[in-house]
Structures are given as C-alpha cells and as structure tokens.
Amino acid sequence: MERQIGGLGLAFELGSDQEIQAVWLYYGDGRTQAETAETLGVSRTTAANLLASARRRGLVKIELEPDLLGGVDAARAIRKKFTLKGVHVVPVPKGTATPEIRERLARAAAHLLDKRIANETVLGVASGRTMAALGEEMPRRHRPDLHVVQISGSSIGDEATSPEACTLRIASRLGAHGFNFLAPAVVTNVALRDAMLKEPTLVRHFERIRNCGFVIFSVGELNTETTLAESDELTQAVLPEYIDGQALGVLIGRFIDCNGNEIDGPLRGRQLGPTLDDLLAIPERVCVAGGKEKIAAIRATLAGGYVTHLVTDTDTAALLLDWQK
C-alpha cells in the first residue's frame, strides 16, 4: 500500500524518482526531514542525502532576497566598524512605520535570544516598548534554571512597558524565574537613595545584576516621545535640562552624550538602578534598537562601548555606516 499525501498516492503524483518526492515533501509541502523520511519510508539520513543530491542535480535552486543579502553585508560592515561581536540587520521596507519596525526587531531579537541563552543562568532585562514587544515574541520554553533579572528601577507609568512588566513577561515565556527590582528608578533626594541602597533586598538584587552573563536592552531617544519621560514625573520635570545639556539618549535610565558618557544633571545621585559601569561589566550586551528617530541615541550607545551585539533595521544600518565619528 502506497503512502498517501493529500489523498493521492505519492508515486502517482510525483513519479518513482525519490529525489523528486523528497524535494516536494520538504520544500513544496513544508515538511521536516524527519517527516519526509517517514513518508518515504526511509531513514532520516537517506532523506537528507536525497535532498542534497537533488540540489546537486539542480532540482532545487535557492535564491536569497536582495534585501537579505544587503542586510548581511551591512551587518558585517557594522560589526567591523564598531568592533562588535555580532550584528543582525532586519530587512524593513521603505516607509515602514515605527511600531512595525519595533515588532520586526523584537521578533528577530527573540529568535536570536532564544538560541543564545541556552547556556546562560542569569539574564538581565531592561524596559521600554521594544522590550515589551520582545516579551510578546519570545517562544515558550521551560527554563527553571534561568533567572531573568530586572536591571532598571521600577516606574509608575505605562504598565505594559514598565521594567517589572517586561521582566516578568519574558520570564514567563521562558518558563524561568523572574526577579523584579523592588525600588523606584528615581527618588527625591540623595540621602534617601543612599539609605535604600543599604537595604538587604536591594543588596541582593544588585548581586543578581552583577551575576548576569547576558543583558538585553534598547536605548531611548530624547524627545517628547521618550518612554522614560512618560513613565516618571521626576524625570519628565528635568528632561529639558538634559536636552539642553546635549544629552542624546537614555540608556538604562542614564542620560548620555554623543560619546556615550553620562551627563551630569539634576538626577545625579538620585537614581537607584545600575550605573553604566555596571552595564559594561556584563559580558554580553545586546542592544535592540532601530528607526531614524533613534539614530543619535544608537550612535551614542555604540560610541560608549556599551554594545557587544546589535539588532537593528536596514535604514538605521545605512545611517550608522555613513556616520563619521
């Protein structure tokens, strides 16, 4: 009795050439190699050999989209220019709206993160709209050995993009343990900040942050759309002072200039989150950011050396390559 596909005998539809049968099942019908082997009644190794032979015969022609090839070239050039460990450039059509760019970047970052953290035990997570989108795109896993740690202080703004929500969402998707930063990002005075940093709960949490082998974050542009400004009244009140002081971006709650240096300002000494030096101490640091409105902030982040891996889009990649430091 012949095996059936779509109600018709396989040999009847495709003839007796097993290579053609394998090609159709794998490429045309979208089956896995294991499913292809089972349908043909052969071993998985035989199925793989049939597919390889079919490619050599010219039965299969693999073409890469020009945008994809361009993205690979741009990724290599950016990696070399900024001395990064890895770069992934996501093809994005011209005119794509910012929310869709964010979703595409989050989808790519989720795929890369899923593969990269296989051997990690402590993952640091920042906040913002990109991290919230990442949480939606992460595949479901069962990683009870993994600790997902919030690296930014908590806020009272948009619940969906808050640091605590981003951390717990990603932890939930990964089936991991989530640890929130149980303190605000900014307090009213330096004395209060110093006292809170002595609290055992925060001492333990900073130990978790220092134990991170991998951290994923985005960077915020400085304008009226800045997520941090929307979520924190204390920050919103002083935002114009930082912009006047030549701040170009917000990185884990810290304002940075064109060289990636933290800018002194009214919040100095009142922030409870990790410093930029704490960020630099984490071995692998993945920045997920794109869109023309963020280009100055991304450049500043790269200039400061805070990034080991970058996920961005094609237009942003072109602007980064044109940039003369």
Image (spheres, helix red, strand yellow):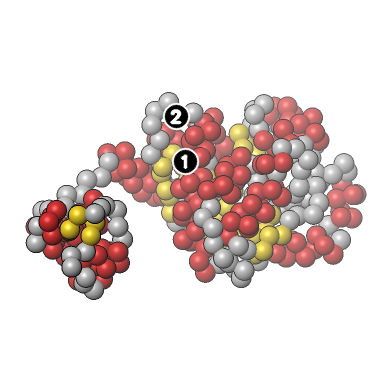
Circle 2 residues within 10 Å: few <14, some 14–19, many ≥20: few
Kind of residue sitting beneath label 2: Thr
Disc 1 residue type (three-letter): Arg
**Relative height, residue 106 to residue 26 (above, below):** above
The residue closer to the viewer here, 146 or 141, is 141
Q: Name the residue under label 2.
A: 96
Question: Where on the picture, by quarter, is residue 16?
Answer: bottom left
Tag 2–tag 1 contact (CB < 8 Å): yes
Question: Image point 43% across, 50% down: which residue?
Answer: 87
Residue 259 falls in which quadrant of the image?
Answer: top right
Measure how far apart labels 2 and 1 are at the Cα level: 10 Å
Determine the secondary structure under disc 1.
helix
Which element type, helix, strand or loop, lies under badge 2?
Answer: loop
| Residue 126 visible in the picture | yes
Q: In this view, does 204 lie above or below 43?
A: above
In the picture, measured across the screen, residue 261 lies left or right of residue 190, that is: left
Q: Mark 1 points at which residue?
A: 104
- Dot 1 surroundings within 10 Å: few (below 14), some, or many (20 or more)? many
Q: In this view, does 300 lie above or below 222?
A: below
Give the label on residue 130, or none: none
Viewer-nearest residue: 149 or 262? 149
Nearest the eye: 259 or 169: 169
